[in-house]
Image (cartoon, rainbow, N blue to C red):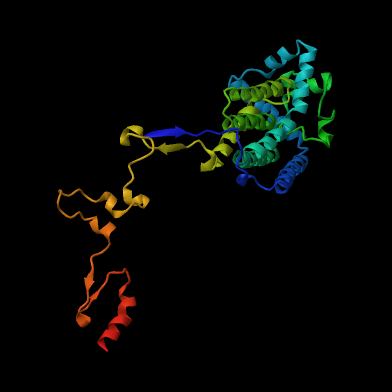
Amino acid sequence: MTYARTEPTDQEPDIRARPPLVREFLLVAGLFLAYKFGRQAANGHVEEAFRNAGNVWDLERTLHLPGEGAVQGLLLHSQPLIHAANTYYAAVHFPATALFLVWLYWRRPRHYVRSRRVLAALTGAALVLHLLFPLAPPRMLPAAGLVDTGQVYGPTVYGQTPATDTMANQFAAMPSLHVGWAVMVAVGLIVATRSRWRWLWLLHPALTLLVVVGTANHYWLDAIVVGAMLAVALAGFRLPLSARTVPARQPRPDLWGSVEGPPEPAYAGGGAPGAFAPAVPAGSAAPGAFASAGPPPSFGAVGGSAEPADGTDAGSRAPARAGAVR
C-alpha cells in the first residue's frame, strides 16, 4: 500500500478556518494592552529585582554559562554595529511578530489560530513570572560590568531612571519575550511553509538572542527559561488534524493492474442482467433469452380463454376476469 504525502501549499488558503477579522483584531489588541498594563503593575520592587539579579548572575557562573560580556565585547568593536543591534532590539520585536500573525491569518488560517494561542499563553505566563520574580537586567548589575548600550549609543526604548519609567517595566528581564516571540515566528513559518529556504527563519531568533545579550538587556537564563515555556505551550496547542501533514492512502497499481482501482461488476454500473449471465451450451435456452423476447404467454383458467401477455399487472386484469365470471 502506498502513501502520498500532502504538505502545506502556497495555493488558496482554507478560508473556512479563518476567524472573523474584527474579532481577531480586538482580541489581539486586548491581549497586548492587558500585557502592557500588567507589566506596569509589576513595576517597582527595586531591591528584590537587584537581589534576584545577583542570584541569577551567580547561578550562571555556577553553570559555567558564557559571560554576557563576551558577546557585548564583539559588538563594541564597531559603533555602527552596536547601533544596529540597539535598533534591532527596539524596532524589530513587535513589527516582526505582528507581520507574522497577519500573514498566517491571510495565508494559513489554521496555523494562525494555533500560533495566536501559543503566543497568548506564552505572554500570559511571562507576565505571571514578571510579577513573581522581578529581575534587573545585566546592564544594571554592577557585578556584571556591562555597558548600557541603549543609553550610551542609542537608540533606546527605556527611560534613564528605571524605577520611574512609565513606558516600560525595566525589571522584567525574566523571561525574554524578545527571544520567545522570535522563536515562535521562526517555528510557525517553518511549519506553515514548504520552501527549501524556510529554515533560514531560524536566523531571526539566533540574531535576537545575540542582540538581547550583547546589549545587556537579558541574561542567557532569560532565553533558556522562555525556550522551556514555549516548548510547553507548543505541546499544549497542537495543530488540528486537517492542517497537519497526513498520509493519503492510494490504491496500489500492482494489486489490480491499474491505478484506477478494482474491476467493477456490470450490475454496479446499471448493466442489463443478461450482460453477466453465464455461458450455456449451444442449442439450449439461455437464461437471458427471455430478457429480450419478453415473458412467455400465460393462460388464464377463467372462461377457458387465453390472456395475452401484454405486460399488464394482475391488478389491471381484475375487471376483465370479473366480467367473464358474470
Dividing the image into 4 quarters, which one contains the N terminus?
A: top left
Measuring from the top left, give residue 152's x and y in whole percent: 83, 19
Q: Is residue 148 visible from the viewing direction of this image?
A: no
Q: Is residue 210 visible from the viewing direction of this image?
A: yes
In the image, what residue occupies the spot 14% across and 51% down? 283
Which image quadrant is residue 182 in? top right
Query: With respect to residue 20, does 157 lie above or below?
Result: above
Q: How many marks?
A: 0
Relative placement, left or right, of 316 versus 56 is: left
Dividing the image into 4 quarters, which one contains the C terminus?
A: bottom left
Query: With respect to residue 251, does 274 lie above or below?
Result: below
Looking at the image, which is closer to me, 311 or 44?
311
Query: With respect to residue 109, does 184 lie above or below?
Result: above
User: Residue farthest to the bottom?
Assistant: 326
In the image, what residue occupies the spot 76% across and 40% down? 36
Measuring from the top left, give residue 320's x and y in whole percent: 30, 81
Looking at the image, which is closer to me, 275 or 163?
275
User: Residue farthest to the top?
Assistant: 77
Which image quadrant is residue 123 in? top right
Looking at the image, which is closer to me, 286 or 219?
286
Relative placement, left or right, of 142 versus 317 is: right
Measuring from the top left, give residue 126's x and y in whole percent: 66, 38
Relative placement, left or right, of 8 versus 87 is: left
User: Residue farthest to the front?
Assistant: 305
In the image, what residue occupies the spot 62% across and 24% down? 202
Looking at the image, which is closer to me, 188 or 5?
5
Measuring from the top left, give residue 148's x and y in whole percent: 79, 21
